[in-house]
Amino acid sequence: MEFKEIKAEDLRFNPFSKIGKDWMLITAGSKEKFNTMTASWGGVGVLWGENVVTTYIRPGRYTKEFVDTNDTFTIAFFDLEYRDALNICGTVSGRNEDKVKKTGLTPYFIDGTVAFQEASMILVCKKMYHDTIKHDRFDAAENIEKWYPEKDYHTMYISKVLKILVK
């Protein structure tokens, strides 16, 4: 089945379950070299007059290098039958082995970036702003202990949604 582009106004999904429960893949790079990672933190909304997504990546993740060096990246959502593949992408480092080959996912190159043919929905995103979460900005100190015992604070990326593709 091929992808078709839809408008943001026509998108119907629950971001709380889609991101937090079903997970997503964040992928960046080119045909020559790319990496992907599973994420379950993020958001969707409107900022600065644009439809945006917010993603969070820890400093040690290999995919972060690709997001940082490219203007665009993708967020892809999958049906539950791909849960094992998303587990692999969240636990295996692309620095050490070819996790895409291990998952059996098929790279899908679009608009100078990468997603996967097996996705049910792809958001093509362009970075607009990023910053590292700061220790002294937490209003709920228990979140520091719970989520950042190693002090490896995520970088937050706010990105414009350029294109939405669905099957």
Image (cartoon, grey):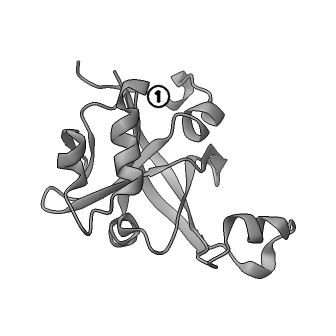
The residue lying at 24 percent from left, 33 percent from top is: 117
Asked whether the viewer can see residue 153, the reply is yes
Residue 154 in picture, x, y percent from top left: 58, 69
Q: How dense is the environment of label 1, judged by Cα within 10 Å: few (below 14), some, or many (20 and up)?
A: few
Considering only vertical position in the picture, is 3 above or below 103? above
Question: Quick one: SS at disc 1?
Answer: loop
Considering only vertical position in the picture, is 76 above or below 2? below
The residue lying at 24 percent from left, 68 percent from top is: 96
The residue lying at 39 percent from left, 42 percent from top is: 86
* Residue that numbered label 1 is attached to: 7
Residue 157 in picture, x, y percent from top left: 54, 62
Left or right for 58, reference 100:
right
Left or right for 11, reference 94:
right
Please identify the residue farthest to the left as the structure is shown.
32
Identity of the amino acid at label 1? Lys
Q: Which of 166 and 99 is in front in this view?
A: 99
